[in-house]
Amino acid sequence: MAGTTKRISVLGATGSVGDSALDIIAGSPERYQVEALTANENVTKLAELAIKHRARYVAIADEGRYDDLKAALSGSGVAVGAGLSALEEAAAMQVDIVVGAIVGAAGIRPTMASLKAGNQVALANKEALVCAGDLVMAEAAKLGKPILPVDSEHSAIFQIFDEDNRCEIEEVTITASGGPFRTWDQRSIAKATPDQALKHPNWSMGAKVTIDSASLMNKGLEVIEAHHLYRMLREKLSVVVHPQSIIHGLVTYTDGSMLAHLGAADMRIPVAHCLAWPERAPANTRRISLVELGQLTFEAPDLERFPCLRLALDALDHGGNLPNIMNAANEIAVAAFLGGRMTFGGIPELVERTMLEMQKRGESKPAGSIEDVLEADKSSRVVAEQLLVHIN
């Protein structure tokens, strides 16, 4: 592939992962060419990015912003679309890599559209695997192409996971920073404000992902992802809190060897790996100095203070549609917390109550199609909103 320009589409181009991807692309114009960009509603930034990176096509999820986007790109020659069908059109354009960085369940259909079109997917959208992992991985298997994980933790594991000797893998460990409340007591965590929850000690991310990191739901979602990405049983997956965020993942083999991936807390590193794969390419990313770091520390996660991690593990143990239900409830809970309608301590309460209610209704059975997944997502959100009024 050396010397060949790769065509790249970025779904969710205006978010933090999109920023990282486009920074890498801009740093190596001889290697990468932007084909399509999408965003949810940020017309101004999307138009600026389209012009800067010479995109052929852009799509905005919010159909009401179509005219604004069209006007912003008037005379540029960039084709414009709006709505879910436009996102899927962008995802299905024939390219070398689609970076899937749409936040939330909204990324499921575009991810499937990318795969069905035969595109290599570099996936940052956790929910595609959490909500529809069996279906997504089955589609990827038809292509004979691995899904390239953009998350720093899963990129780390991908790079040290010996697929040819997977039967010799004893354990896969995902690291967690512990978030801003790592040392807080349970009572203080429950009363935390949005401003406090959004102050992540190591990473710069979007609001939803940052809140998930503060609750450790992010780690629960990543364990579910690992189950699908690496076909690993739940009992072979673990989480360890590592405040420095230097080791991003570990794989332990049956001979006692433990391989670890180290890197700075810089999302451009896993993005650069995905874009260049199966090669490696120079990138202007942050480097680490072990001498300057001095020491790396590790702790067990506290499931009492961070019940969202426990709920995610329970959902994986149960299987079926329960991870999807849990994710939908969590999205409602995080939005309610950020909107001042609920305390931070109410997030796990709402998630758990929604999971129990949907199980009672018999709605947690496995999904047979993406339509089933999205219908369960929709009904779970309705139930969560109904339950929300009973939670502080």
Image (tube, rainbow, N blue to C red):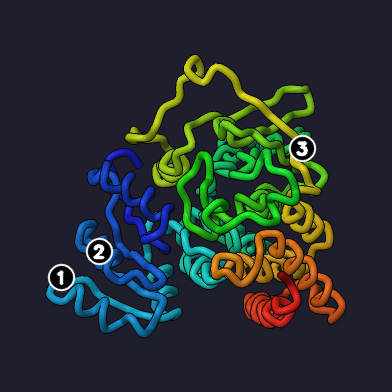
Specify whether residue 278 is in view.
no
- Which of marks 1 and 2 precedes in the sequence? 2
- Please tell me whether residue 71 is drawn above or below residue 160 in the rendered image: below
Q: CA distance from mark 2 to mark 1?
A: 9 Å
Residue 183, image x, y percentages: 68, 38
Of 124 and 90, which appears nearest the observer?
A: 124
Task: Work out which quarter of the rendered image holds the C terminus and state it.
Answer: bottom right
Q: Are marks 2 and 1 in contact (CB under 8 Å)?
A: yes
- Residue at 70 percent across and 56 percent down: it is 190
328 on left or right of 52? right
Residue 76: which disc? 1
| Kind of residue sitting beneath label 2 | Ala
Task: Work out which quarter of the rendered image holds the N terminus and state it.
Answer: top left
Point out the frontmost of discs 3 and 1: 1
Residue 299, image x, y percentages: 72, 32
220 on left or right of 177? right
| Kind of residue sitting beneath label 3 | Cys
Which residue is tagged 3? 167
Which residue is tagged 2? 50
Q: CA distance from mark 3 to mark 1?
A: 53 Å
Q: Are marks 3 and 2 in contact (CB under 8 Å)?
A: no
Of 41 and 172, which appears nearest the observer?
A: 41
Q: Residue furthest right?
A: 360
* Count of residue discs: 3
Which structural element holds mark 2?
helix
- Residue at 60 percent across and 44 percent down: it is 179
| Kind of residue sitting beneath label 1 | Ser
Q: Residue furthest top?
A: 291
Residue 101: which disc? none
- Which of marks 2 and 3 precedes in the sequence? 2
Q: Residues within 10 Å of mark 2 (few under 14, many from 20)?
A: many
